[in-house]
Image: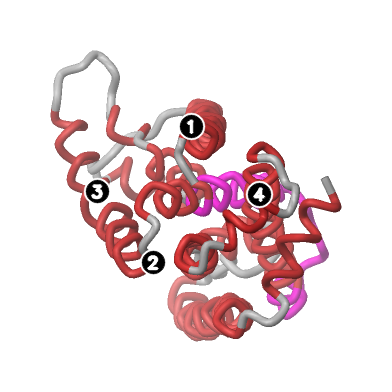
Amino acid sequence: MLHLLNIEFLKLQRNRSFLILIILFIVSVFGANYIVYEVSTNTGHIVHETSNKSFRLFEFPEVWQFVSFISSFLLIIPCFTVIMHTCSEYTYRTHRQNIIDGLSREQYITAKILYVVSLALFATILTVACAFFIGMLGNDPISFRDFRCVFYFFIQALTYIGLSFLLALLIKKAVLTIGIFFIYSFLIENILEKNLNRLNTGIENIGHFLPLSSSDHLLMFDILKTAMRLANIESYAPENAYLTASVIYIVLIGYACYYLYKKRDL
């Protein structure tokens, strides 16, 4: 397994686009969360002065949940790295050369899956580091009460990055794949979700269980959920339901990747 993963990272060592996107992702995670932290801190001072209520989103233990939520909007960047790397393999026929050089199809696709998992794990570790750093800026002692949200972020990262990899295998063209992934994740699935939620299927808000939406709802932070319930805008299923749906989608995406590459002509 480590040998296969090492092969993937050897390919990426001199890939300037990959390095630029990874650096951009690191800067974006810390930068976006710090900007929101500064805004929330200033807002918190106003709230505290007017109503004696503290603004705790970026203090322990809430920081694990909120930083994971903010960072989830930036997962589009590692998705782009997977799409560009996978499609470039088809463009320059390096995937075929790997098979000629001795890798089996199963080994090749396993290496790609390991790369996807490693990228999701890297994004999660980065989020943990960011949450810990920002949480330390507050006065509260370290608490891991909401640390489960970090695991939910990992599940969401696997879902997003895995789906982007599957689309890259299907389409093979980087620009077209990025366009389709962007349109689906930000437009098509949101439209499908809203329309499915209006149907009388016997399952409340069934649209929440679409591939990306199910993992998104794992990271809907408690304050937002409470506000939407009080306003009668939306209700939510238990976290375990969204987690189960997300894990099922991850398994299906992984199986589809294996099946597609094994059956397709090189």
Q: Which mark is residue 190?
A: 3
> CA–CA distance between discs 1 and 4?
14 Å
Asked whether the residues under the numbered discs 1 and 4 touch, taking CB atoms below 8 Å apart as contact, a structural biologist would say no
> CA–CA distance between discs 3 and 1?
32 Å
Camera sees residue 229? yes
Label 3: few (<14), some (14–19) or many (≥20) C-alpha neighbours in 10 Å: some
Give the label, 2 or 1, closer to the camera.
Answer: 1
Which secondary structure lies at badge 1? helix
Q: Amino acid at mark 3?
A: Asn
Camera sees residue 80? no
Q: Residue at x 63, y 51 (%)?
A: 112
To which residue does mark 2 refer?
174
Does residue 235 appear left or right of residue 27 in this picture?
left
Q: Earlier in the sequence, mark 4 or mark 3?
A: 4
Closer to the camera in the image, 190 or 95 = 95
Give the label, 1 or 4, closer to the camera.
Answer: 4
Q: Position of residue 11 (x, y in %)?
A: 69, 69
Q: Residue at x 48, y 51 (%)?
A: 160
> CA–CA distance between discs 4 and 3?
39 Å
Label 2: few (<14), some (14–19) or many (≥20) C-alpha neighbours in 10 Å: many
Asked whether the residues under the numbered discs 4 and 2 touch, taking CB atoms below 8 Å apart as contact, a structural biologist would say no
Q: Which mark is residue 99?
A: 4
Does residue 167 appear left or right of residue 70 in this picture?
left
Read off the magenta span.
133-161
Q: Amino acid at mark 4?
A: Ile
Q: Which mark is residue 263?
A: 1
